[in-house]
Amino acid sequence: HLSVSGAAPSFAAGFRGGIEGCSSSDEVRTLSGSMSPGLKSNPDLHPCKPGQKFRAALLRCRSPAAAAGILSFGNVLNYMDRYTVAGVLLDIQRHYEVSDSGIGLLQTVFICSFMVAAPIFGYLGDRFNRKVILSCGIFFWSIVTLLSSFISKEYYWLFVLSRGLVGIGESSYSSISPTIIGDLFTNNSRTMMLSVFYLAIPLGSGLGYILGASAKVAAGDWHWALRVSPLLGITAGTLILLFVPEPKRGSADQMGGRIKTRTSWVCDMKALAKNRSYVFSSLASAAVSFATGAFGMWIPLYLARAQVVQKTAEACTKEICNSTDSMIFGAITCVTGLLGVLIGAVTTRLCRQKTERADPLVCAVSMLGSAIFICLIFVVAKKSIVGAYVCIFIGETLLFLNWAITADILMFVVIPTRRATAVAFQSFTSHLLGDAGSPYLIGLISDALQQSYATSALWRFLSLGYALMLCPFIIVLGGMFFLATALFFLDDREKAEKQ
């Protein structure tokens, strides 16, 4: 039988039964990242059969780094699919002939189904095979997205419903995948891998805008924007089934042997409610979600209206609308996401040498700084699109600083057997108080303001800008919540370590 060193008991568990009667001198990578002789030569063993060689090669490919890479790729696709719709929003609005609030309902329904499903998948993720749940979720949303591209304009309600079903599928991935990475790595390695994983959020979001606009232009039909990501999603689901291990919960933290019993869901929820760092960081995460949800949905449309006001572009009256702003905004989101997550990881690592409260403090400072530049967007957009893009670039970079750090805070203050539930409930809270309502709320305020005065290109632009001004105030509130997290972070981390 295959013998794997004690450095990675969970890895051995994932391949219980091993490769029988097979001789090889190859090494395998353990969950801790170290190399250990996985397949020892033995004169009593006969040569590998072709099928056994394949299994041995497959085992060697299941390294922690490869698993983290595949999970990050899946996260890119998750967010790419989510924002492909935003990339062709103007076309969808014209095709289905709906108002600002009606088009904002697309994202709101998606997020509502996402957040309702998150606690369910969190419960399942702490108790059952996580990679199977992930793969099924990816296959489900890929198929639904593909089918939604064939819905005719008489059935807008069905298109809205399809976005709700996609939200359920994507919820399984966002709730569970970070916990696998949490069980594969620890300390600074975990911070770095989570940074790579959460880098996928802005990268996937930005690519969603670019993919949607590019596919629409190439095919001459916006429906094709929804037919590319499903194929990639099915590929990602297959890779997860083949190459991602199912680590024992708490193995990377060296808690695997100490975790004797699993607490009930009610007990888990009571413990999380008493965890002040977790509660405040979840509220701060909701503020980030509010701003990113509203911005992701409305900023390209806002900038398109700004150019109509400046006389540098005309209002869309064609079947295929100009998507230049969506593509530029998508590219900015990709770059700022990369910079934000990397700067956040490096800054936190350096600041930990000065203070143990570095994680929440870095998040708080970045949030407060972001609010200033986001306010400036609405000041300069009427006169200068370039100036607006500069403010968006700086504001988004500062806002994206805290994504991976927030996940790392959770890993520090929550015990391993409770993490999937914690991630899922944090996702539920942040969406409920954040982007579940912000796209629709902004559209509703914009519609209300437009009805107050005679409709004109200028007033359509200004009304949407006034509605979006709500975002910087919410971001400042999020910064305050991160400061509150810093007050209790050390105590809660110590409690989790003792437990």
Image (tube, rainbow, N blue to C red):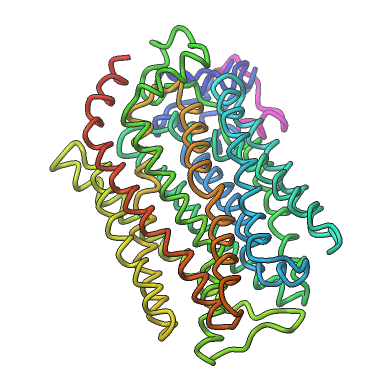
Residue 253, x across and y down, in percent: 36, 24
Residue closest to the eye, 177 or 174:
174
User: Residue at the spot x=24%, y=30% of the render?
Assistant: 488
Residue 437, x across and y down, in percent: 55, 49
Residue 440, x across and y down, in percent: 59, 55
Q: Is residue 118 above or below residue 317?
A: above
Horizontal side of residue 376 vs 180, given as left or right:
left
User: Residue at the spot x=60%, y=62% of the render?
Assistant: 208
In the rendered image, the quadrant that contains the N terminus is top right
Residue closest to the eye, 249 or 300:
300
Is residue 432 inside the magenta stretch?
Answer: no
Residue closest to the eye, 132 or 18:
132
In the image, farthest residue toward the front: 452
**Is residue 341 in view from this perspective?**
no
The image quadrant that residue 124 belongs to is top right
User: Residue at the spot x=38%, y=33% of the render?
Assistant: 410
In the rendered image, the quadrant that contains the C terminus is top left
